[in-house]
Structure formats: structure tokens, C-alpha cells
Image (cartoon, rainbow, N blue to C red):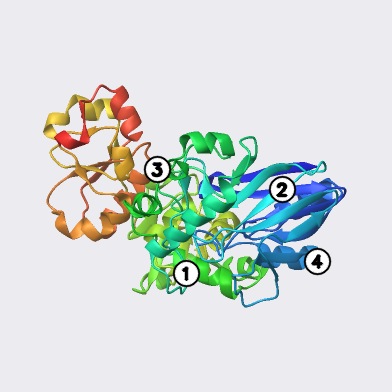
Amino acid sequence: MYIEQLYTNCLAEAAYYIESEGEAVIIDPLRETEPYLALAEKRNSKIKYVLETHFHADFVSGHIDLAQKANATIVYGSKAEPNYDVHLANDGEILTIGKIKIKVLHTPGHTPESVCYLLIDENGNNHSIFTGDTLFVGDVGRPDLAVKSDLSQEDLAGLLYDSLQKNILPLADNVIVYPAHGPGSACGKNIGKETFSTIGEQKANNYALQPQSKANFIEAVTSGLSPAPQYFFHDAAINKAGYENIDEVISKNLNLLSVDEFDALSKNPDTLILDTRTPDEFEVGFIPNSINIGLNGQFGPWVGALINPKAALILVCTEGKESESVLRLARVGYENVKGILKNGINAWKNAGKSLESVTSIEPNEFVKDIQNFSHVIDVRKPGEWNSGVLEAAQLITLDEIEKNASQLSPENTYHVHCAGGYRSMIAASLLKKKGIKNVINIKGGMAKIKEAGAKIVELQTV
């Protein structure tokens, strides 16, 4: 038996490869198929099943393309109703892979169709459970993401309680827990930093697995839920309905544009310029009205949080990163790319077109003169604010910055920071696009600000 977790940091997503006696299964694959096909070929195995834990909301799964290329069977729980051919597995149904078995456990709650997959090893022992978004390290799946369901989030939270009581808590402490997501995913409220655990560790440390009434569980799971990112329901609907082949999507979206063609498209008010270069590249020169979301960070989730899934996009990329940009957009269901600037920002500069820039300041310089900076914006998440904030900072999460730009004065100079510098450049680009031109990015974010000796205060004293 062989198990491999294929973890993608920028999406905080885990897919799994399981193999026995030359047969393999893939659980919750990403949109691109090559990594899974290559792994099976390397290990001289044939992919027999592609298992889906539910209709994913935060990425478009690669299950359809992968199953077609591998001649494998897609499996969902029997409560799923996809618009394509799959095997709908009953609760308790056993799938055989070589000398091991996988037991399908219906675990509604995160979504009505959610299932977990219990791996039974060659000796008949429960070895591990692949929990999808039902159970995370330190958390459980949010219960407000069902596609076209009449169930309220409280109804789903109640179902999740029952699922955990029936199928998770009775498992032995040594059973390994392999969830679909790690820290940073918006599919939970506060997922722990590890990407796998054990049932025993979760019984000891996960708030959702502590002895409690159903009513208390529902309150705990539904309280403090931030609004779901706008693309979540878009992606879940795609995963339910089916989609265009990923190879065709990439081919269609890799449309290289001349400077004049790009310029013409940029003047369309319905077209958005997305610059996927790093913050350091972006700040020294970018096309006016561009939004910077760099490939070097959590690109897909921030695209999903900040850009309408139906938006027509034109891209500015680091040269050689065009295909990666298109693929990573397609991973989260963004396929309406009208073109990419050929030869990147250098082509724009060489054509004599105008550029804007963002001024950045070193943390030491910022802290040294902090008393003269009266307008500081902290774009971190609320959970990050709990570890301390700058005394005079305005607390506006990145996903709320565009909506709150109208409350800011174009006459003021705003210093913007996040935790490490990635999100603050996104915020600076959004503010500039909204007409707030005097924006200064604080390099290195709160981590470096603390190192520079700034006075940090508890959130409640602000």
C-alpha cells in the first residue's frame, strides 16, 4: 500500500494518491491532470477510481478530465446529483483497490452530498480516513456552502454534528486524518497549521469534537463565519454541472496580444487588467488601473475573493509565466481571459506607454517616523488582528478594501501593511484603481514592523 498527499500551498488544498497492487485512486484532484497521470505511470499503476468528497467550492476539480484520460470511474456519494456520468456510492459501500478497501461514509453537513473515505488496509484494519471538508485539523467545514439547497446553515450544522458523532468519533485514536485543506483555506474558520493528523489528536484538540450538545455545536460552528468568497458558489456549480476540457481552456486563453491590441481592450470598462507579477516587480512600474495579485502567493483564493468570476480579464505576466497564470486562473474557475500582453511589461515600456508605480517604505524607516504617519491601514484578517495591531491603524480586511475606498480621502497619504507584504501590494493596487493615489506600501508587513520595534497594542485597546 502506498499513500501520497499532493499538497498545493497556494490553494491550501490536498489531493491524494492511494495505490495497492498496481491499482490506484485519486481523491479530490486539482484541475490539471498531468501530476496524477505522471505519478501513476512512474509507479506503474492504473488509476481505477477518481473519488470526490463533495462539490468543491474553492477550486474546480480535475475529476472529469482525469477520469477520461485514465479511463477511470468518478465516484461521489449517492446524495450528489452531477450532470455527468459517475458512480453514486451508497453509505457503507466498499470499493476494492488491489489488496485494500475503501469504505464510503456519508457525512452530510459541510454540504448535503459530502462523504468521507475510510481506508482499510491489507490486514483489515482501519488505517486512515480522507475527510474532504468534513473534518480539518483543528476545525470542521463551514456549513453554508450548499449548492441550491433548501437547508439553512443551521440545518447543515446539525447534520454535520450527526455525521461526526456517527462516523468520526467512533474511530480508533490511531486512524490517520487526511483532510482536503490546510491553513489559509476559507472552507473552514480557523484550520490548523498541519495538513494531516490523527483521530486521537483531533478528539483532544478540535473544538468541534469535544463533548457537547447539538445546539452548542451548531452555535459554535455557525458563529463568526465570514462571508463566503464570491467565487465559491460559481465553482461549486461548475463542479456539479461539468466543464470544458482544461487543455482547450488553456489553448483558448493563451492569446498573446500586441501593445495596441492590449491597449484597445483595456479601454473597455468591462475589461479588468490583472497583473500576476510579484509585488516587487509590480511596484516599480505597472499599467494604470491594473490589479496586482502575484503568482508567488495565494493567487487563486485572492483572485476569487476580489474579482467577479464572469469578468473579462487581460493579463500582464512575468515573461514565461503566461501558461501558469492561465492554468491557475482556470483552477478556480476563471476562464474568461481575453488575452495576455506579449513580451510583458517591457513591450509596454518600449512602446512609450504610461506607467504608474507604488512607493514602498522600509519598516525601520516607517517605525522611526511613525508619529508623522496618521493614516495607516492594516489589511490582515480579523484573526491576525488578535495578535496585536498598530495603535492608530484603520482595520480593513483586504477583501473589504475596495468597498471601503469611498470612505478614504484622495487628499491623504495612506501607509498600508499586511502580515508579510503580499496582500498590502494587492491593496495598494486596488486603492490606486479607486483613485486613492497617495499609497505607500510597508515592506515586510507586520512581521518586519514588529522587528523594527513598533509599539503593538492589543486589539481591544484600539
Near mark 3 (Cα within 10 A), the count class, few <14, some 14-19 or many ≥20, is many
Q: Residue at x 56, y 61 (%)?
A: 114
Using the image as rendered, state which of residue 196 and residue 420 is in the foreground: 196
Q: Are marks 1 and 4 in contact (CB under 8 Å)?
A: no
Nearer-N-terminus badge (2/1): 2
The reply, left or right, for residue 407 in relation to residue 265 is left
Q: Are marks 2 and 1 in contact (CB under 8 Å)?
A: no
Q: Are marks 1 and 3 in contact (CB under 8 Å)?
A: no
Nearer-N-terminus badge (4/3): 4
**Amino acid, disc 2:** Leu
Please tell me whether mark 1 sits on a helix, a strand or a loop: helix
Query: What residue sits right under mark 3 in the picture?
Result: 422
* Cα gap from disc 2 to disc 3, whole angstroms: 39 Å
Query: What residue sits right under mark 2 in the picture?
Result: 119
Residue 103 position in % (x across, y down): 71, 55
Query: What residue sits right under mark 1 in the picture?
Result: 234
Q: Residue at x 29, y 45 (%)?
A: 379
Query: What residue sits right under mark 4 in the picture?
Result: 71
Residue 138 position in % (x across, y down): 47, 40
Q: Quadrant of the C terminus?
A: top left
Nearer-N-terminus badge (1/3): 1
* Cα gap from disc 1 to disc 4, whole angstroms: 27 Å
Q: Is residue 122 visible?
A: yes
Q: Quadrant of residue 239?
A: bottom right
Q: Is residue 352 visible?
A: no
* Cα gap from disc 1 to disc 3, whole angstroms: 25 Å
Mark 1 or mark 3: which is in front?
1
Near mark 1 (Cα within 10 A), the count class, few <14, some 14-19 or many ≥20, is many
Q: Quadrant of residue 83?
A: bottom right
